[in-house]
Image (tube, rainbow, N blue to C red):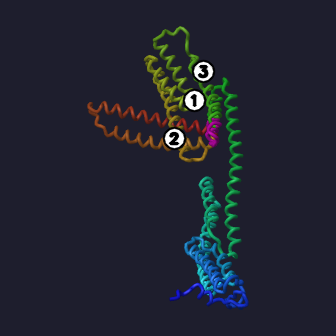
Amino acid sequence: MDIPDHPLTEARRYGYVQDGGVWLRPVLGQPARRIGQVKDTDDDALRYFGQRYEAFRAKIDELLERLQAADNQGSYLMKLLHLQEQTKQHDGLGDYEGLHRRLREAEEQLNVSVARNREKNLATKVSLIEQAEALRESVEWLSASETVKELRQAWLKTGPVDKALAPPLEERFHGAVQEFFDRRKAFQTDRKALARRTVERYRELVNQAESLKNSDQFEAVSRQLKQLQTAWRDVNGNLPKKQAAELWTRFRAANNHFFERLKTHIETQRPAEVRPGAVPGSPEESLLRKRELARRAEALIALPPNQGVTQAKALQAEWKQSGAVRGPESDQLWQRFMLACDKVFEMSALDYYLRKRQAEGSPPLSPDERAQTATVALRKFIESDRQELAALRDNLSKLNNSAANDQFRQLLQGKIRTFERKIQTKTELITLFQLSTGS
């Protein structure tokens, strides 16, 4: 029984031998054409060209399988078109009509997929453009720069869109990105200029402080150095840590040098009324010491608040060791001394309040603005003190006059005197601030 020769049968369906040549029957609108010659037998020649067709068909099968599994199918379009043309020119015997139809169907499906993908790509690119344009007003340079880099990477990874839409989209996106980088560059240029001005301002303040540190004009220079300290805070510059530390060290050293000299000056001052020969431990000597302590306490207002508080506490300790004195002047000196110390403590509390406000984000204040802010704060504090004072006085008026309440009555009276002095102290500080601003 003969075994059917299928390859030969298939080859004869699509070709034949004539005049020593192998011919392909008319296909794809083309006339029959000679594709080779017979070298051995007619059947061998037909089988050979049938095998060439099968190899070509296998190549197409492989391509279509890869196309189905591919993520970026659009990249296969030119290969499909090239193979379609080859079906009209390939030298083999087989169903080129069927191969061409399969390739055309794959092309149509691919065009649909490409169109759908280009719509998605268009939506993605429009979104990327809007995100890039939204950074026009951003000043968060670090985070915004990272965002721009991510947008650029996403743009490169996004597939193509319709050719007619591509140029204006590219122009919008890259224009928005370039605008951001131009603004960042301008900011960095301004920041460098600001840093130079900041360094120059700090150096100017350092030089001024160093030129004043050896002055003997203690009262005037105290005010000038306080103004320089306020100006230093107002600069509020952002410099490299090492550079800022060097400038601050010089500035602080000049201030400390002067105020140490002022401290020594205050401690060595003796009142004009001191008379040589006063008997140690006598009421006269104690009175002279208290006069001196009162004057020294009044001079503390010229010191920085932290140094003033330390000196005031030291003077209070000296006062306790200065001996007992009786008479009207003793009471007056006590009032002077306590009022002077209270001013130092109130000024320290006020300075803390103003620095805390500054740390919470308030803009830097000029010396006049700082004085005005201090005045407003003191008036608010006075109002609070008056409310406390009114409550104390009300409690005292309602207290029974029995002897059992004497101790509590004395406690209330002491607190009332304390709040009366607080109000007086703050009122005098307001006057000092008003005089400093000329208001």
Circles 2 and 3 in contact, beta carbons < 8 Å = no
Q: Give the extent of the magenta segment.
A: 228-243
Give the camera-side residue of 43 and 173: 43
Q: Which mark is residue 303?
A: 1
Q: Which residue in the structure is indicated by mark 3?
A: 265
Relative image position of residue 197 (x, y in whole percent): 71, 42
What's the amino acid at mark 2? Tyr
Please say whether residue 195 is visible from this viewpoint. yes
What's the amino acid at mark 3? His
User: Relative to residue 215, is residue 10 depicted above or below?
Assistant: below
User: Relative to residue 134, is residue 40 depicted above or below?
Assistant: below
Q: Main secondary structure of the magenta part?
A: helix
Give the camera-side residue of 78 and 14: 14
Relative image position of residue 195 (x, y in whole percent): 68, 43
Q: Which residue in the structure is indicated by mark 2?
A: 353
Say which residue appears at 60% left-offset and 73% top-offset.
Answer: 73
| Separation of marks 1 and 2 at Cα, in angstroms | 18 Å
Give the camera-side residue of 157 and 103: 103
Relative image position of residue 133 (x, y in whole percent): 64, 64
Q: On the rendered structure, is 123 left or right of 283? A: right
Indicate the quadrant containing the C terminus: top left, top right, bottom left or bottom right.
Answer: top right
Say which residue appears at 54% left-offset and 87% top-offset.
Answer: 4
Q: Earlier in the sequence, mark 3 or mark 1?
A: 3
Q: Residues within 10 Å of mark 2 (few under 14, many from 20)?
A: some
Relative image position of residue 178 (x, y in whole percent): 70, 60
Describe the element under mark 2 as helix, strand or loop: helix
